[in-house]
């Protein structure tokens, strides 16, 4: 059964120590031969980290400091994201504070949409899907997934598996929304992360709230399974999680270590049923052009 | 009242509000629409607009059009308004009048030369916030000593924050000061400067500002302004693009009475009200301001606020930028 560690953290000055603790709890060991590490935070649109919508650059900063202490001195670290239908990396890197972070920590900042890529075919269920895999990810020795935990109308949950959606360099991502489950699973199969470190310091559920959570696991499915529980969702009712398990990306069943999960469950700002109905109505009618 | 024939230029977020309002109004005929987007032109055709153009120049050539609504990015306001006036069209232009005082003056001079009517889109003057004007004028507040005006929200990011299902990219001109004329101060501050000037019937004698750059962009994403009116009223203006929650708030502190008005909107709630078929307070203010302009054109009266008023607001915005305090 996959291990998922839960650690309490709050102040940016503690991020490095908390990351160290969370990684130790899942018995993760760094290969001394790794030379290229890629970090994938969540940069959904231009929302500030303090809203809970995007990964805090200070959290990524703590991770970089930890990596510097625990890998070889010449390791190359890159932070990656790609352009999306509504978000351009050129602005997001600046607005969300990643440009400043990259300069401070002397790491590369890469827009995967501008990267060279190779078309890669992958089978999900009984169909084949083709994705463009960026060179930066192909050459990486290690991919660290640093997602957020959020509700999403069509998927119910967005966390580790969905965060890899941002590694797809094709900008018009909304075109994939018709078969999102297969695309998420397919992308995770061709761009496998080595470890997931969830920035749950500030979360956005029914509202924005300081949760002070750091979660670590080698298994993205188990990570999402814990995230689902925090949101009050049944993991086996989330289609892409079930599919991801079936396709061998990990296990829905997990063993949590560290802080008791109930501590965070009680504090997570869960959506009320009326919020869900309202959100579905508004988005549905917006999509149909009934409201403008 | 005679039927006023309108040409609408720009079908962006605000342009669409005007577009739908044109169909709700009596004595108004939307004759033509101009927009560079094919999708927008198709929308206009689908709603029965017969003349649809990809450039506003073609629209000006139509002699049937009495007036135009300009709802374009700020850097196109002056060029488009001046060309419209040269063709004898009355002009309704979205705020800010232009990206700087020089362009604003060119618009005002052209309006004076051509004799066309002009109006700048400041919907707050046609919203529930307008009720305070009557209270001030009737002396119910005594002497107003201090005013605090707030407009904080998502600014150009609001299309996404409003819960739209289809992602809307922020047009890049918003992030370029040379195209937008500035950031949150010119975008949102111009509303509040205009409203306070109108409330007090007085001009601003001095202004200082503190600009915020949380988003690390060349344009400011927040601004605090400290103003003093000629007759002594002190005011603060607080604007920002940084919040998921939109709030517009006015507080007026008088010697006899203090009033506080606000219209906070949570993400998605205004859409929910639309869904129920009820016009939102915001959409009503857009309707009211356009209705005022149409009535003025039809009855040969001067609309308010005119381009001259918009220029005065731009002068204060420009002064606020020049008088930035570094804390």
Image: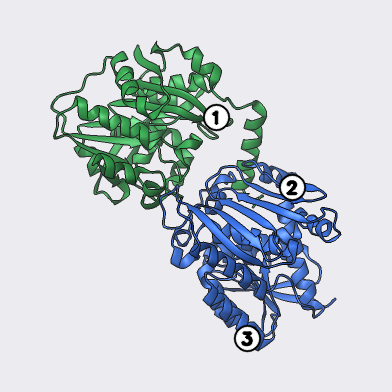
Chain colours: A green, B blue
* Figure check: A283 above or below B310: above
Classify residue A146 by image quadrant.
Answer: top left
Q: Secondary structure at mark 2?
A: strand
Which label belongs to residue B261? Answer: 2
Q: Chain of mark 3?
A: B
B102 or B62: nearer the eye? Answer: B102
Indicate the quadrant where residue A60 lies: top left
Q: Would residue B159 appear left or right of A15 to someone viewing this image?
A: right
Q: Position of residue B170 (x, y in %)?
A: 48, 55
Question: Which type of secondary structure does the marked residue at label 3 adopt?
Answer: loop
Q: Earlier in the sequence, mark 2 or mark 3?
A: 3
Q: CA distance from mark 1 to mark 3?
A: 54 Å
Left or right, B37 with respect to B4, comes to: left
**Residue topped by disc 1:** A205
Classify the position of the N terminus of chain A by image quarter.
top left
User: Mark 3 = which residue?
Assistant: B87
Q: Vertical placement of A198 versus B235: above or below?
A: above
Q: Distance between the Cα atoms at labels 2 and 3?
A: 42 Å
The structure residue drawn at horizontal position 46% and vertical position 45%, both measured from the top left corner, is A45
Residue drawn at the location 45% of the way across and 11% of the way down: A260
Residue A19 place in picture, x, y as percent: 32, 23
Mark 1 belongs to chain: A
Instruction: Decide if residue B151 is in sight here.
Output: yes
Residue A81 picture location, percent across and down: 34, 43
Q: Is residue B91 above or below residue A47?
A: below
Gap between marks 1 and 2 measured at Cα: 29 Å
């Amino acid at each position: 059964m996959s291990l998922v560690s839960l650690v309490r953290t709050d102040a940016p000055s503690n991020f490095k120590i908390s990351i160290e603790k969370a990684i130790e709890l899942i018995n993760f060991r760094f290969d001394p031969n790794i030379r290229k590490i890629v970090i994938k935070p969540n940069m959904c649109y231009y929302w500030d980290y303090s809203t809970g919508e995007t990964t805090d650059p200070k959290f990524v900063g703590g991770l970089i400091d930890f990596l510097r202490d625990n890998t070889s001195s010449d390791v190359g670290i890159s932070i990656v994201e790609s352009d999306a239908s509504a978000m351009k990396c050129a602005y997001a890197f600046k607005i969300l504070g990643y440009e400043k972070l990259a300069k401070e920590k002397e790491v590369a900042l890469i827009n995967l949409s501008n990267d060279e890529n190779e078309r890669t075919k992958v089978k999900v269920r009984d169909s084949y899907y083709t994705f463009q895999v960026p060179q930066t990810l192909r050459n990486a020795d290690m991919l660290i997934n640093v997602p957020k935990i959020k509700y999403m109308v069509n998927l119910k949950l967005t966390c580790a598996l969905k965060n890899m959606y941002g590694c797809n360099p094709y900008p018009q991502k909304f075109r994939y929304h018709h078969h999102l489950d297969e695309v998420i699973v397919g992308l995770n199969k061709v761009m496998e992360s080595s470890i997931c470190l969830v920035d749950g310091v500030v979360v956005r559920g029914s509202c924005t709230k300081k949760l002070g959570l750091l979660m670590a696991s080698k298994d993205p499915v188990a990570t999402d399974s814990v995230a689902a529980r925090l949101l009050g969702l049944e993991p086996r009712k989330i289609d892409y999680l079930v599919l991801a398990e079936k396709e061998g990306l990990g296990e829905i069943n997990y063993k949590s270590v560290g802080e008791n999960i109930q501590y965070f469950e009680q504090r997570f700002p869960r959506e009320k049923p009326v919020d869900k109905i309202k959100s579905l109505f508004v988005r549905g009618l917006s999509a149909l052009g009934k409201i403008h | 009242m005679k039927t006023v024939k309108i040409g609408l230029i720009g079908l962006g977020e605000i342009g669409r509000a005007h577009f739908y309002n044109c169909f709700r109004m009596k004595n108004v005929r939307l004759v033509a629409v101009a927009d560079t987007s094919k999708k927008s032109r198709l929308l206009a055709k689908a709603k029965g607009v017969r003349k649809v153009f990809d450039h506003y120049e073609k629209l000006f050539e139509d002699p049937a059009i009495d007036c135009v609504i300009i709802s374009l990015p700020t850097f196109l306001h002056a060029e488009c308004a001046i060309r419209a006036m040269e063709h004898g069209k009355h002009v309704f232009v979205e705020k800010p009048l232009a990206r700087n005082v020089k362009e604003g003056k060119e618009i005002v001079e052209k309006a004076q030369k051509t004799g066309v009517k002009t109006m700048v889109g400041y919907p707050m003057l046609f919203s529930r916030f307008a009720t305070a004007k009557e209270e001030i004028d009737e002396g119910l507040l005594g002497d107003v000593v201090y005013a605090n005006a707030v407009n904080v929200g998502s600014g150009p990011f609001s299309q996404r924050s409003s819960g739209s299902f289809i992602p809307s990219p922020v047009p890049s001109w918003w992030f370029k000061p040379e195209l937008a004329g500035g950031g949150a101060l010119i975008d949102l501050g111009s509303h509040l400067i205009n409203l306070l000037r109108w409330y007090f019937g007085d001009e601003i004698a001095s202004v200082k500002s503190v600009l915020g750059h949380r988003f690390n962009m060349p344009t400011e994403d927040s601004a605090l302004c400290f103003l003093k009116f000629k007759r002594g009223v002190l005011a603060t203006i607080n604007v920002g693009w940084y919040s998921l929650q939109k709030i517009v708030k006015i507080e007026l502190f008088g010697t006899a009475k203090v009033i506080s008005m606000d219209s906070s909107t949570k993400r998605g709630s205004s859409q929910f009200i639309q869904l129920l078929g009820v016009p939102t307070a915001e959409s009503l203010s857009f309707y009211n301001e356009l209705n005022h302009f149409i009535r003025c054109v039809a009855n040969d009266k001067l609309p308010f606020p005119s381009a001259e008023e918009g220029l005065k607001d731009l002068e204060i915005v420009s002064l606020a930028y020049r008088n930035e305090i570094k804390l």
